[in-house]
Image: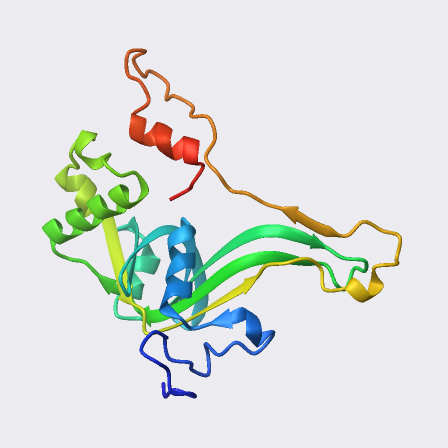
Amino acid sequence: MADLYPPDTNDYPTTERTRVRRSPKRGSHAHADVHAILDAAPLCHVGYVINGAPYVTPTLHWREGDHVYWHGSSASRFLRAAEDMPVCLTCSIMDGYVMARSAFNHSVNYRSAMVFGTARLIDDVEEKTDALRRFVEDLFPGRWDSLRPMTKQEVKATSVMWMKIEEASAKVRNGPPGDIDEANHPVWAGVLPIESRLVSPQPAPGLPYEIELPQSLAGLIQSGRLR
């Protein structure tokens, strides 16, 4: 798809389907802005068109440079059909409810990213296993080496997809309600912040009492970060 505007080297191309039309000041095509949202959101939704019908599936993802990876069951008809297919992957994070003086002006603070590319399947067993290792290490640094090694059947039962980001846009709203001109109306207005964070761990049934929570996981919980 041809660019509508000549991008600079730090931006994804601004195309007809990624140009932000509504509230364009909130939009961005900068690599840094898109990547920051992809990295902050553990969950993505991948959209496909299969046999003329649209499907959207949720999954965990991770990013390496301009490549985004996701995984699922090898038995998934979506993943089997998606190979070499154009896909749209989206992430969104809610940061707060924006309470205005009127119902019309209520909103949310959010961060969202939409990226486009062509889905590719990793066939090589060693490459797939290494991709899954990087996935686990991205979420939980240092954990992979402590786990029972994956069996051949487990690797076979797992599909890893990836795509190079060809087009992308980000959109962010962050701030109070935009109705300062109605400040005299006698109703509370402001922002109700939303936080997604890790909380106290819940040990698995049968876990031997002498096995303590690793310091790496304790650090994640203390920081509260999701990834």
User: In this rendering, is residue 2 above or below 128?
Assistant: below
User: In this rendering, is residue 71 above or below 216?
Assistant: below
Q: Looking at the rendering, in which quadrant would you find the C terminus?
A: top left
Percent across and percent down for residue 180 are 78, 63
Percent across and percent down for residue 3 are 38, 87
Q: In the figure, residue 34 lies in which quadrant?
A: bottom left
Q: Residue at x 26, y 39 (%)?
A: 141
Q: How many marks?
A: 0
Q: How is the image coloured?
A: rainbow
Percent across and percent down for residue 123 are 15, 57
Q: Is residue 29 left or right of residue 108?
A: left
Q: Is residue 105 left or right of residue 205?
A: right
Q: Residue at x 30, y 31 (%)?
A: 216
Q: Residue at x 23, y 36 (%)?
A: 142
User: In this rendering, is residue 15 above or below 109?
Assistant: below
Percent across and percent down for residue 80 are 28, 60
Confirm whether residue 162 shows in the render: yes
